[in-house]
Amino acid sequence: MTAGRGRILASTLACVAVLGAGAPANASEPAARKAASASKPMHVAPMKSNGSGIILSYRIDGTPKAGSPVSVVLRMDGVTDPAGATVRWVAGTGLSLVSPSQTSQMLASGVISTLAVQVIPAGEGVGYLDVFTTQYGAISAMSIPVQVGKAPTSLPATGELKQTPSGEKIVPMPVK
């Protein structure tokens, strides 16, 4: 096993140990809701090869409603810089932070970090929580969508599939 795979295995085992131990429950949150949100899958943010190298996963706990706070759970893994790393977040258009004074956190090397950022959607539609991770001087950025109400449906195709003389398949669309 390579050293890199050994660190990933150690990080995974540490995550399982932390998740297995659990944190003290929030007494105001019903037990069924806690179990449901804990079982929701995390979405893994795409990574660029020239980014910070931190693996960012996220999930939205609860159903976002206009004017009501909702938690965006962030999980950061892959901090290898001995000096640690940082994560910073900013509410984009359509969202506001519940705690605007708390917008960043240090991340320890070799530790999987999880935090919940409380946001308040302004209204129907989609708002974005912008998350920036920094390690070794490299920065990665991710915009996490927080959808209030139904997502807009995609436009239906107006034409039928046709084939060009060269064999390429296309959908002709009217032009105004």
Image: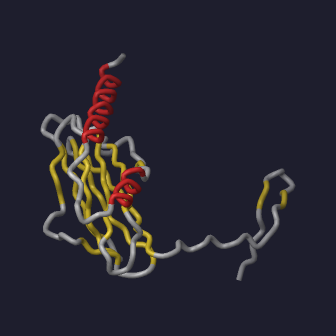
Task: Between residue 35 and residue 3, name the one nearer to us.
Answer: 35
* Figure quadrant of residue 18: top left
Q: Is residue 175 left or right of residue 27?
A: right
Viewer-closest of 112 and 80: 112
Q: Quadrant of residue 49?
A: top left
Q: Nearer the viewer, residue 3 or 43?
A: 43
Q: How is the image coloured?
A: secondary structure
Q: Is residue 101 above or below residue 142?
A: below
Quadrant for the C terminus, please.
Answer: bottom right
Q: Residue at x 19, y 49 (%)?
A: 86
**Residue 48: x and y, percent?**
39, 45
Q: Give the residue at the far top of this rendering.
A: 1
Q: Is 23 on the left or on the right of 61, as rendered?
A: left
Across and down, in percent, residue 154 comes to 62, 70
Compared across the picture, whether 66 is left or right of 135 comes to right
Q: Position of residue 159 (x, y in %)?
A: 79, 70
Location of the N terminus by quadrant is top left
Numbered label tally = 0
Could you tell me residue 108's position as x and y percent? 16, 41
Picture residue at 38% right of the left edge, 58% below the top: 32
Residue 84 visible in rendering:
yes
Query: Can I make out residue 43 in this image?
Result: no
User: Which residue is located at x 84 percent, y 57 percent?
Assistant: 163
